[in-house]
Image (cartoon, rainbow, N blue to C red):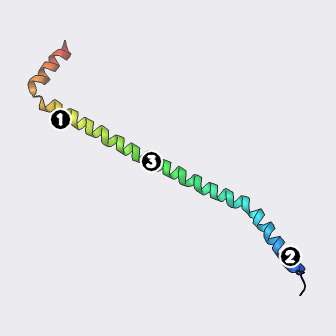
């Protein structure tokens, strides 16, 4: 048996290696772009969620404040009006 390899096989393996090495930068950039797109999408989603939570907190504090004012009765409101008018 001979230990030689056909020239066609050597050329085929060499061209495959060249193609893999040539495609690697494009695949790496594609991966990077996908990762960046996902990160930006998550950041946008987190911003929306945060804004919704702030709105809920503001609405709750307004409701509690008004409830407290209304529970004090009309005399407190009248006294406050007199103090503000001075």
The furthest residue to the bottom:
1
> Is there a contact, CB below 8 Å, between mark 1 and mark 2?
no
User: Which residue is labeled 1 in the image?
Assistant: 67
Sooner in the amino-acid sequence: mark 3 or mark 1: 3
Sooner in the amino-acid sequence: mark 3 or mark 2: 2
Residue 10, labelled with which disc? 2
User: Which residue is labeled 3 in the image?
Assistant: 46
What kind of element bears circle 1?
A: helix
Residue at the image point whose x is 78% and y is 67% from the top: 19
> How far is disc 3 from disc 1 in space, using C-alphas?
31 Å
Mark 1 Cα within 10 Å, few/some/many (few <14, many 20+)?
few
- Quick check: 49 left or right of 1? left
> Is there a contact, CB below 8 Å, between mark 3 and mark 1?
no
Residue at the image point whose x is 26% and y is 39% from the top: 60
Residue 59 in picture, x, y percent from top left: 28, 39
Nearer the observer: mark 3 or 2; the answer is 2
Residue 61 in picture, x, y percent from top left: 26, 36
User: Is residue 32 shown above or below 72?
Assistant: below
> How far is disc 1 from disc 2 in space, using C-alphas?
85 Å
């Amino acid at each position: 048996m001979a230990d030689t390899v056909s020239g066609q096989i050597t050329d085929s393996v060499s061209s495959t290696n060249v193609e893999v090495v040539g495609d690697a930068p494009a695949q790496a950039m594609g991966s990077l772009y996908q990762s960046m797109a996902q990160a930006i999408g998550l950041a946008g989603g987190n911003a929306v969620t945060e804004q919704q939570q702030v709105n809920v907190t503001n609405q709750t504090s307004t409701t509690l404040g008004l409830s407290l004012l209304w529970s004090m009765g009309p005399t407190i409101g009248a006294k406050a009006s007199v103090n503000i008018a001075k």
